[in-house]
Image: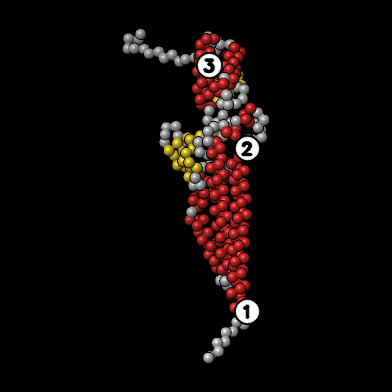
Amino acid sequence: MPHLDVNWNLPDGTAYTWFVATPGSILLIIVAGLAFRWFACRAIDRLVQRAVVGSVPGVIANSRAGEFLADLRPGSQERRRQRAETMGSLLTSITTGVTLVIVIVMVLAKLGQPVAPIIASAGILGVAFGFGAQNLVKDFLSGIFMILEDQYGVGDVVDLGEAGGTVEAVGLRVTRLRDVDGTVWYVRNGEIVRVGNQSQNWARTVLDITVGYEADLDIVQRVLQEEATAMYQDEQFAGIIIEPPEVWGVERLDKDGAVVRVVLKTAPLQQWSVARAMRQRIKARFDRSGIRIPTTIQTIVDEEGT
């Protein structure tokens, strides 16, 4: 019977390297990558849970407003949760992608494959992608920072410059909002250079009331203060008007009369309903107090001059 001689002592320990050392190193790299991803995802989950809870700004945390700011309107908690989960999902995807690329490159290096050309090619592709899709990259980066900084969320009323209205969807590339006329606007995040948010933390109702020059301005201001305070103390507006109202005084003198300003600090998105109710109260009180609101009388002359 012929003798089969298998030489396992190959030069430079080739057999040991291919069947023991290399698989062991690759397995260790994979395990280390999975462990790193697990720890990173745990840290991201903790950050997400902390972000979901939210916090009240310290400046107003001790005021009456601070009691309402965590949940001033329906869906505020849901908005925080969605924003936190969106960022958590994005960070998890980035962590997974980066870890996977590093593990693949290290495994290829252990298999003896040249990784320098791969890294160089990836760099060239990245530069080409950056130049060819600058607007897309800009939109995504802007969307990430908008979500991370909580500049606005679904349900907020915002002014984005070219368009304004209620935010219906916030994506990493495009923000969708609907204006008061019902028109839906799609705004690329990279094109947003400023954001005016009318529904974040708190809002303010500012009413400029014009009265005739014959009116006693001290009485007018007292009447406005009384009506605003009565509205503030009304149970119907509990939690809506969050601080005692103020009458700032005479704002300006117009051709029709003196303009007196009264302001009320409100919960987000409630400033318009408060303004409408306050105007109705002021009109009724002025009628009872004999305070005249100037009106423009239009005179029509017919062909006979009468």
Q: Residue furthest front?
A: 1
Residue 8: horizontal and vertical position, in percent? 60, 82
Question: Percent x, y for residue 284?
Answer: 51, 13
Mark 2: few/some/many CA within 10 Å (<14, 14-19, 20+)? few
For the residues carrying marks 2 and 3, which lies nearer the camera in this image?
A: 2
Residue found 63% across the figure and 31% down from its top: 66
* Residue under label 2: 55
Residue drawn 56% across the image and 47% down it: 87
Disc 1 versus disc 3: nearer the observer: 1
Q: Amino acid at mark 1?
A: Gly
In this rendering, position of residue 171 left or right of residue 38: left
Q: Please tell me which residue lies in front, 201 or 218.
A: 201
Q: CA distance from mark 1 to mark 3?
A: 95 Å
> Which of the two discs, 2 and 3, labels the residue nearer the N terminus?
2
Disc 2/disc 1 C-alpha distance (Å): 62 Å
Which residue is depicted at the point 61% across and 51% down?
42
Tag 1 secondary structure: helix
Left or right: 175 with respect to 49? left
How has the structure been colored for display? Answer: secondary structure
Residue 190 visible to the viewer? no
Q: Quadrant of the C terminus?
A: top left
Mark 1 Cα-neighbour bin, 10 Å: few <14, some 14–19, many ≥20: few
Q: Secondary structure at mark 2?
A: loop
> In the depicted view, which residue is nearer to us: 274 or 122?
274
Label 1 belongs to which residue?
Answer: 13
